[in-house]
Every structure is written in C-alpha cells, then in structure tokens.
Amino acid sequence: MSDDTRTLVLALAALVVGALLGWFVRTWLWRRLLTRKQRFFGLPKESECLLVVPRDPGARGWSVARHDAFALLELAAVIKECGAHAEVLAHDTAWQGFGARTEFCIGGPVANLRLAAHLRSMLPGIEINTDPAPGPDQGAITVGGETYRLEKGAVEYVLLARLAAARESGNDRPVFLSAGQRGIANQAAVRYLARHHARLARKHGLDATFCLLLRVVNSQAYGSDVVELVGDVTKAATTRKAPATGKVSQPDRSPAT
C-alpha cells in the first residue's frame, strides 16, 4: 500500500470515527435533556397525566374556552415529547387525589374549583379577589403584602406554580397551576413554562415547589407573546397567614395623676 493510499484510508477512518463519536455525544445529550425534562414534569415514558380545565360558560355542554384550548396545545407538545399520555377533564369532574398523576390545572379560582382547592391547601399565602361585581379589585392577586390589579388588555397577571408531592406518600407526581386573571394570561403562563422549563429546573431544581408571578403586557396588541417575570413569590405563597387573635384593645382607665 502506497503512502498516499494509507493516508487516504486513515483520513476516512478518522472521519468515520469522528462522525460516530459526534452522533454518540449528541444522542447522549439529547437523552440526558429528555430525562431531565421528564423528571421536571413528572412525565416518564408511557405515564399518564391530567389536564384540568374550566368549562366554557358560553357554550352548550362540555366545551373548552379558546385560550384554554391554546394552552392545552402548548402542553400537548411537551407531553408528546416526554412520551406520556394525557386525559382532559372538566374541573368539576376531577375527583382524584394529589400526586398519583402529574396534573396541569388551568384557570382562575372562580372558573376552576379544583384549582381553587389547590390554592387553599398548598398556596395559602395567596389571595385572589373572586367578587363578581365589577370594580378595580376584581380578580386582583395579593401575595407578599402586594396587590396586583388587572388592567384588561394592558396588564394582566398570572401565577405559575409547580407543587411537589411528598415523596414518602408514594404519590410523588407534581401539580402545575396556571391561575390567571384572564384566559389569555393562562395561555401565556403555559407557554412560558413550556419554553423555559430547562431554566426553571436549573434554578429551582427538578423536584422542587415554586410559585412565580408573571405579567402579560399589552395583550390587546401582542396577544400572549410578551410575558415578564414579576418575581419568585414561593416563600410568601406557601406561608400560611397567622390567624387574627380577636383581641380588642381597651382604653386606658388608670387614674390621672
């Protein structure tokens, strides 16, 4: 074999080895990222999850509102990539426990009774004004001593939370909540979750509980695309408020000197 032929054979061998090594590294990285994604969402391959949504009040029978349907489409892509399966349930028919299956609960506490129950039991530091009467505080979210009011079409707030179940219970699948002041805010929060799950996992951990407050800006012009992180409100949201003591202060009746 001549030197030129030997050089050509060695070059081809190096190209083959390099291509195989590159394929192996890319496959390993893809599998690692997929495994982390499945763990963060609690969606191992062939597992099942629940999509709990309100009923559309303007439709007859069992129907999903438009922005809730868009949110479900965002989640469907995540679920498919994880190799899992989903069941869509109306909020008033999801009579199941917590942690047995991953759950995505979308809506507000008025339209979604199951979400309201999750807020009361696991995020007791959050208050959402559910008064149906129109007013500046309608739908306002209060957390950490701050109140965030709705400005329809201009500024809308939404809570995005991942609630981890206790591992000792044996049912350790998380619940994801999107509690927005309007349907478009819920769609924005679910899209934020789908797009930024890797960063959220790095910051909060793959198995942690967290609660974020997001702001949707100028939805009347930009739809659900412009979303800003207001802050991480996990500590305030998960801290139960101290009950009022009920004591009434008494006037000082000591004699004047």
Image (tube, helix red, strand yellow):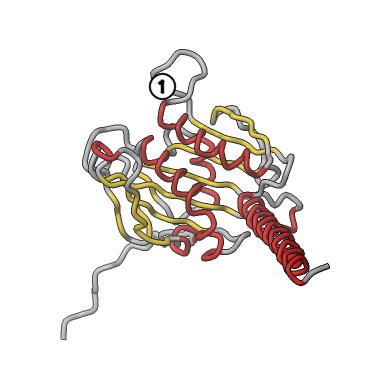
Asked which quadrant contains residue 255, the reply is: bottom left
Position of residue 108 in the picture relative to residue 89 (left or right): left
Asked which quadrant contains residue 110, the reply is: top left
Q: Residue furthest front?
A: 2
Position of residue 4 in the picture relative to residue 57 (left or right): right
Quadrant in the picture for the N terminus: bottom right
Q: Amino acid at mark 1?
A: Pro
Residue occupying image coordinates x 72% and y 64%? 8
Residue occupying image coordinates x 44% and y 23%? 56
Total marks placed? 1
Residue occupying image coordinates x 39% and y 18%? 58
* Depicted 202 relative to depicted 114: above or below: below
Q: Tag 1: Cα neighbours inside 10 Å, few (<14), some, or many (≥20)?
A: few
Residue occupying image coordinates x 34% and y 49%? 227
Q: Nearer the viewer, residue 174 or 76?
A: 76
Q: Nearer the viewer, residue 252 or 117?
A: 117
- x and y percentages locating residue 179 in the rendered image: 43, 43
Q: Residue furthest left?
A: 257
- x and y percentages locating residue 215 in the rendered image: 33, 50
Q: Nearer the viewer, residue 96 or 103?
A: 103
- x and y percentages locating residue 57 in the rendered image: 41, 21
Read off the residue under disc 1: 57
Quadrant in the picture for the C terminus: bottom left
Position of residue 147 in the picture relative to residue 36 (left or right): left
Q: Residue furthest top?
A: 60
Q: Nearer the viewer, residue 148 or 79?
A: 79
- x and y percentages locating residue 3 in the rendered image: 76, 72
Q: Residue furthest right?
A: 1
Asked which secondary structure carries label 1, the reply is loop
